[in-house]
């Protein structure tokens, strides 16, 4: 139970950033990143140039990595972070950001527990000046997020409507709790995670402690999921392109073919090496 009846859907590391500051370690880190790049590309994601804070490299799916004069950086997100964070951390022993997430399916839907948590935390800090910045945001599409802290804070918490954010039926009725941890705090959090029986128990324990320490209820849930690693719900870039083609190009192609421009359509799409027109109606072929 967490602010009413709820079921644990997923828990895991949702983001992991690590850096290498010497040539040998940077080489090992980049070799690992290239392996992930190949995996993400094979899954249908596009490889794109990427730059940040002086680093230059590549982005593909759930991976970003690059180099600069003083070393290399690798950033993992979503399911890739959940599965591979430990491997890259073993290479560098460094972490500048780690995000912990717990996803619950709530009997009352996502908005009610978010509102209840907001009220509890605001009551807890009422009249005090030592609390975090509390921000609550809503939109007309059902989006609802509670933030604790500021983006630049070492600890930055958000609780939001995962159903509205993802538009995926898998997350119907789900609320997502995330704790973004940065800078020197990351290593103590990783050490704390390793003190639990499992990493998953550690994620639940750390998030629960954070919430309780700020006036919220502990994370107690009725059912453990069969897998704590979120199955990827991202749409690969190739499928996004196909969807765009279907919605934006297909109607015009149909009109042009009906007007008799079948051969021109094939040539302009660069398909003449792959297809030959089969004309059912000679009037549709100029």
Image (cartoon, rainbow, N blue to C red):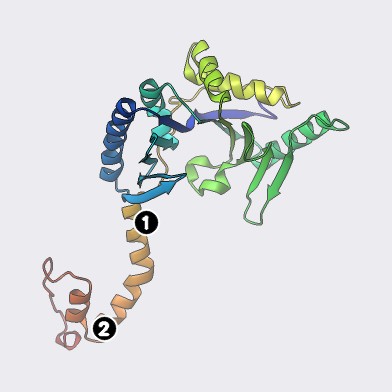
Residue at the image position 29 percent from the left and 48 percent from the top: 44
Residue 166 pos. (x, y %): 51, 47
Residue 124 left/right relative to 161: right
Determine the residue located farthest toward the front in the rendered image: 69
Q: Which residue is mark 1?
A: 240
Q: Secondary structure at mark 1?
A: helix
Q: Nearer the viewer, residue 163 or 160?
A: 160
Tags 2 and 1 in contact by the CB under 8 Å rule?
A: no
Q: Earlier in the sequence, mark 2 or mark 1?
A: 1
Residue 105 pos. (x, y %): 57, 34
In space, the residues marked 2 and 1 are separated at their CA atoms by 27 Å
Q: Classify mark 1: residues with Cα within 10 Å, few (<14), some (14-19) or many (20+).
A: few
Determine the residue located farthest toward the right in the rendered image: 127
Residue 82 pos. (x, y %): 43, 29
Q: Is residue 153 visible?
A: yes
Task: Tell me the tag on residue 258.
Answer: 2
The quarter in which the N terminus is drawn is top right
Q: Classify mark 2: residues with Cα within 10 Å, few (<14), some (14-19) or many (20+).
A: some
Which quarter of the picture shows residue 226? top left
The quarter in which the C terminus is drawn is bottom left
Residue 196 pos. (x, y %): 52, 12
């Amino acid at each position: 139970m967490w602010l009413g009846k709820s079921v644990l859907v997923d828990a895991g590391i949702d983001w992991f950033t690590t850096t290498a500051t010497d040539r040998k370690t940077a080489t090992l880190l980049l070799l690992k990143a290239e392996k992930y790049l190949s995996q993400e590309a094979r899954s249908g994601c596009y490889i794109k140039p990427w730059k940040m804070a002086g680093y230059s490299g590549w982005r593909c799916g759930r991976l970003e990595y690059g180099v600069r004069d003083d070393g290399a950086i690798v950033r993992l997100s979503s399911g890739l972070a959940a599965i591979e964070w430990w491997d890259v951390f073993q290479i560098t022993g460094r972490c500048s950001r780690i995000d912990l997430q717990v996803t619950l399916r709530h009997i009352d839907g996502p908005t009610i527990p978010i509102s209840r948590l907001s009220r509890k935390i605001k009551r807890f800090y009422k009249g005090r000046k030592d609390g975090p910045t509390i921000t609550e945001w809503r939109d007309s599409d059902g989006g609802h997020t509670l933030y604790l802290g500021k983006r630049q804070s070492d600890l930055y918490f958000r609780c939001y409507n995962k159903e509205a954010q993802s538009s995926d039926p898998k997350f119907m009725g789900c609320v997502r709790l995330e704790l973004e941890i940065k800078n020197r705090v990351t290593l103590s959090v990783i050490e704390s995670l390793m003190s639990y029986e499992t990493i998953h128990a550690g994620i639940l324990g750390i998030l629960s402690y954070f919430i309780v320490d700020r006036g919220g209820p502990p994370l107690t849930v009725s059912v453990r999921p069969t897998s704590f690693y979120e199955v990827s719900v991202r749409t690969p870039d190739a499928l996004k392109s196909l969807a765009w083609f279907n919605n934006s190009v297909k109607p015009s192609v149909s009109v042009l073919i009906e007007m008799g421009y079948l051969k021109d359509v094939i040539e302009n799409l660069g398909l003449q090496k792959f297809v030959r027109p089969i004309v059912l109606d000679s009037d549709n072929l100029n």
